[in-house]
Image (tube, grey):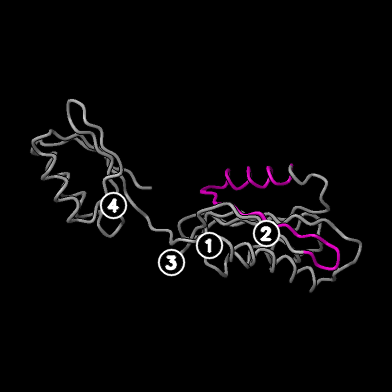
C-alpha cells in the first residue's frame, strides 16, 4: 500500500545557525514534480542549497533526488529515504538550506535533511492511494432511480448529476468494485438503456 499527502506542507528547523525549510506537495507525475522543484528554487533563489527528491507512480516506481551542491549522499538521499520510509508516492520534497556559518559534518547534514522532512510529513494529512475508475453515462429518467439504487449496492459513488433531456452522471468506483459495476453498465448499454464510457483515475 502506498500513500499520498492531501495538502501542501512547509516546515522548518534551525540547527547550529543553519535554517532548513522542507516544502512538500502532491505531484501526480514527473512534470509536476519538476515544476514544484523549480517553483521552490525560485522562491528561495538566494538560499545556499535547494535539495530535493520525488517519487511518482501507483507503486512509487519512479524516483529521483539531488544533493544540489551538498556533499554526495547527505541531502537528496536522506530526503528520498524519509519519503520512502513512510511509503509515500506522488510527492515531491524540496529542502532549502540557508547556511549559518557552522559546518554540520556528513552525519549532521544527513540527520538535518531527514529530520525536517520527517517533521513535514508529520504535519501532513495522509491518505491511502486507492485506484478508482470513473464512468460518464447518460440515462433516461425512467431508469434513473433503479440505476442509482443498484450502483449504491455495488459501492459506486455518484460524483455529479446533470438533469437535462436525460440524466448525465459521473460515477466512481474503487478497483475492487470495478468489475461488477463495469459488467452491469455494459449489460444496460447492450439493452439500450444507457450510454457510458469508463476511465481509470
From the image, tell me which residue sits under label 3: 1
| C-beta proximity under 8 Å, tags 4 and 2 | no
Q: Earlier in the sequence, mark 3 or mark 1?
A: 3
Secondary structure under tag 3 reads: loop
Q: For the residues carrying marks 3 and 4, which lies nearer the camera in this image?
A: 4
Range of residues picked out in magenta? 14-42
Which residue is at 39% across, 58% downward?
Answer: 130
The CA span between labels 3 and 1 is 9 Å
Judging depth in this view, the residue of 190 and 93 nearest the camera is 93
Which residue: 67% across, 59% down? 11
Q: Choose mark 4 or mark 2, whichever is in front.
A: 2
Taking 82 as reference, is 35 above or below it? above
Q: Quadrant of residue 17?
A: bottom right
- Classify residue 187 as left or right of residue 46: left
* Viewer-proximal residue among 131 and 95: 95
The disc label shown at residue 132, or none? none
Q: Label 4: which residue?
A: 173
Is 153 part of what is drawn in magenta? no
Residue 171 position in % (x across, y down): 27, 44
The first of marks 4 and 2 along the sequence is 2
Taking the view exactly as shown, the residue that stands out farthest to the top is 165
Contact, mark 2 vs mark 1 (Cβ under 8 Å): no
Q: Quadrant of residue 159?
A: top left
First reached walking from the N terminus: tag 2 or tag 3: 3
Which residue bears the numbered disc 2?
A: 11
Query: What residue sits right under mark 1 in the picture?
Result: 88
Amino acid at each position: 500500500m502506498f500513500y499520498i499527502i492531501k495538502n501542501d506542507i512547509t516546515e522548518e528547523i534551525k540547527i547550529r545557525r543553519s535554517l532548513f525549510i522542507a516544502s512538500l506537495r502532491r505531484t501526480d507525475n514527473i512534470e509536476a514534480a519538476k515544476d514544484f522543484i523549480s517553483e521552490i528554487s525560485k522562491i528561495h533563489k538566494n538560499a545556499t542549497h535547494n535539495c530535493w527528491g520525488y517519487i511518482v507512480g501507483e507503486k512509487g516506481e519512479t524516483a529521483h533526488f539531488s544533493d544540489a551542491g551538498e556533499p554526495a549522499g547527505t541531502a537528496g538521499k536522506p530526503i528520498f529515504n524519509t519519503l520512502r520510509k513512510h511509503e509515500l508516492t506522488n510527492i515531491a520534497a524540496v529542502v532549502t538550506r540557508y547556511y549559518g556559518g557552522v559546518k554540520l559534518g556528513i552525519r549532521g547534514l544527513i540527520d538535518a535533511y531527514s529530520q525536517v522532512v520527517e517533521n513535514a510529513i508529520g504535519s501532513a494529512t495522509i491518505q491511502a492511494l486507492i485506484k478508482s475508475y470513473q464512468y460518464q453515462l447518460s440515462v433516461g429518467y425512467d431508469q434513473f432511480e433503479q440505476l442509482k439504487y443498484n450502483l449504491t449496492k455495488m459501492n459506486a459513488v455518484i460524483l455529479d448529476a446533470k438533469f437535462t433531456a436525460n440524466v448525465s452522471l459521473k460515477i466512481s468506483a474503487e478497483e475492487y468494485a470495478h468489475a461488477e459495476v463495469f459488467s452491469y453498465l455494459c449489460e444496460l448499454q447492450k439493452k439500450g438503456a444507457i450510454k457510458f464510457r469508463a476511465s481509470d483515475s
